[in-house]
Image: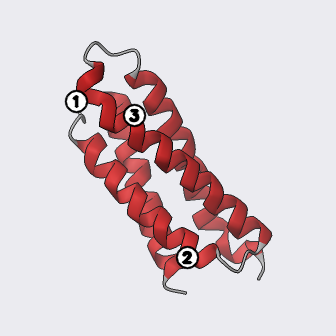
Amino acid sequence: MSHQKFQSCIAACSACAIECYHCASACLEEQDLKMLAQCIRLDHDCGAICQLAVQAMASGSEFAHQICKLCAEICTACAVECEKHSHMEHCKKCAEACRKCAAECSNMGKM
């Protein structure tokens, strides 16, 4: 399986991982860490699964579709959580990246 056919999904996953890790880091600078704890946890989970999805697609892994399906699920959960804090720019941007990645990965999971 050629990684070229996965390019838009790879790009969305890469961008999402970056936004998730940035969001987690920015959340740690906020005043109410307890309120943001779940957001930070999901940011890390989402960033990690996005990186794994990129690796799976780039290497042509036979599990790429299943990983993308799980990635879509985690990205959606992260987006929902970040949207609760969308008054913070980093959470807003993260939610947008997660929604885009979830859509791309959902399409991959159906292939």
Amino acid on which disc 2 is placed = Gln
> Please, what secondary structure does the residue beneath circle 3 have?
helix
Query: Which numbered dot is residue 40?
Result: 3
Amino acid on which disc 3 is placed = Ile
Label 3: few (<14), some (14–19) or many (≥20) C-alpha neighbours in 10 Å: many
Q: Which residue is drawn at 41% across and 52% down?
A: 98
Query: Which numbered dot is residue 87?
Result: 1
> Please, what secondary structure does the residue beneath circle 1 have?
loop
Seen as rendered, the residue at the extreme bottom is: 111
Q: Residue at x 79, y 68 (%)?
A: 59
Label 1: few (<14), some (14–19) or many (≥20) C-alpha neighbours in 10 Å: few
**Residue under numbered circle 2:** 66
Name the colouring of the figure: secondary structure
* Nearer to me, 9 or 39: 39
Residue 17, position as x, y percentages in the image: 55, 45
- Specify which label sits upstream in the sequence, 2 or 3: 3
Q: Which residue is drawn at 63% across and 52% down?
A: 51
